[in-house]
Image: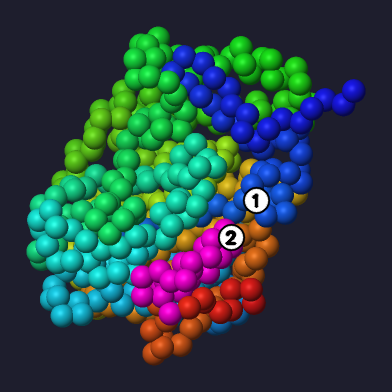
Amino acid sequence: MPQPLLSRRTVLRGLGAMVALPWLEAMAPLNVLASTPGGRAPNRLAFLYVPNGVHMPDWRPKDEGALTELPETLKALAPVKDHLLVISGLTADKARANGDGAGDHARALAAFLTGCQPRKTDGTDIRVGVSVDQVAAARFGDQTRLPSLEIGCEPGAMAGNCDSGYSCVYSSTMSWRSATQPLPKEVNPKLAFERLFGAGKDSDRAKRDARRKSVLDFVREDAGDLRTRLGTGDRRKLDEYFTSVRDIEERIERAERMPEIKLPNVTKPSGVPAKFEEHIKLMCDLLALAFQTDVTRVCTFVLCNEGSNRPYGFLGVPEGHHDLSHHGNDAKKQAKIRQINTFHVTQLAYLLTKLKSIQEGDGTLLDHCMVAYGSGNSDGDRHNHDDLPILLAGRAGGTLKTGRHLRLPREKNTPLNNLWLSLLDRMSIKVDGLGDATGRLAGLEG
């Protein structure tokens, strides 16, 4: 009698722990999730945000069409070039003043996924709109353990005045469940890990932590039983996955033991790695695990808050990012901005390479992802919100034609939300509108 196939929702359980599994051959390649159209692997959706715009001459590809040569800032993405779609000419109109005066940084992040004008207030009467990630989360929230995951690498206040009369919540929050309900991001990798792998009561998790063991130790019995039902290939894949989980745990534990690096203008919460690059990579690995195990299909990742003045001394750039972004066409400042932009893109390359390395069905995890990367500002010196730096990675199950540069007429001010509507379509989510969207974005299929 043939061995029954595993459910895609199979999890390993133990005291205070619940470990979801990656896709295995025993789960059947053509039936990864019965809830997806045609039994295909589901598309995942991630948004990565960087603050203060970029130095556009080093970002924008020279020619439209095939990405034959990447511009300076994007060169780190060469190994995944065929999975990229660089889009020029999109506009975030609701990040503009539109009569509200100063506050471009707060508006840039608040409007990025909502396409709505944030109410200018530093009080409790905040209002903007529902973000695209939460439209997707509402659709899939009952099919995954977490409806969505909100992470970041820089803590931010949820109240107070941070930008010309705008509440700090606008500058530090990308995800909005409703017009008045922001979803704060988790910046501590340990707490993000607990969201993915913790289970049961807080007291159970506390007992597990007190024993200072891996979550894998607490699901060992379930794992041993599962291995007896798997083929050689699946056992190898499971071992690789467990190794990845343990590696993240060890890096988190190491970060907790390391002394903090004293940096100006940066507050580092407990459990955050001393090295910024390690912090970002940990969060990227957690994002990849969340998608690999289908714990969630939606994630937002704010690398740094909008208007961030974080220094990058480890790059030889001791000045604050925001200060440098007001470069006044000073070539030396622009060169330092390029260094910061390149560093951020290098972290994106790390994430995309990770997703590309994970096999899923007849492709890779990156083949079943849509990873949008960009900023709600274009040139940080001008604070303009047209011709935004937007990059889309992944093939969305073959529904995106990648490896090219799509250039839209800048003068048409095509809403950024037109792109977001088009991504929702690829998750089989049909909505009539979103923020200031005027329709779907043409040209994504080539």
Q: Mark 1 and mark 2: span between their CA atoms?
A: 9 Å
- Residue at 53% in and 65% down: 430
**Label 2: element kind:** loop
User: Which residue is pictured at 22% across the width and 61% down the height?
Assistant: 127
Please identify the quadrant where the C terminus is shown: bottom right
Residue 237 falls in image quadrant: top right
Residue displayed at 58% across by 22% down: 12
Residue at mark 2: 428
Number of the label disc, if any, that sits on residue 36: 1
Q: Position of residue 60 (x, y in %)?
A: 45, 75
Q: What amino acid is at disc 2?
A: Ser
* Residue drawn at (28%, 77%) of the image: 384
Whether residue 275 is situated above or below residue 46 in the rendered picture:
above
What's drawn in magenta, residue-wise? 416-438
Question: Which x, y percent locates residue 381?
Answer: 23, 74
- Does the stretch in magenta take in 425? yes
The reply to whether dot 1 and dot 2 touch (C-beta < 8 Å) is: yes
Q: Amino acid type of disc 1?
A: Thr
Q: Position of residue 10 (x, y in %)?
A: 63, 29
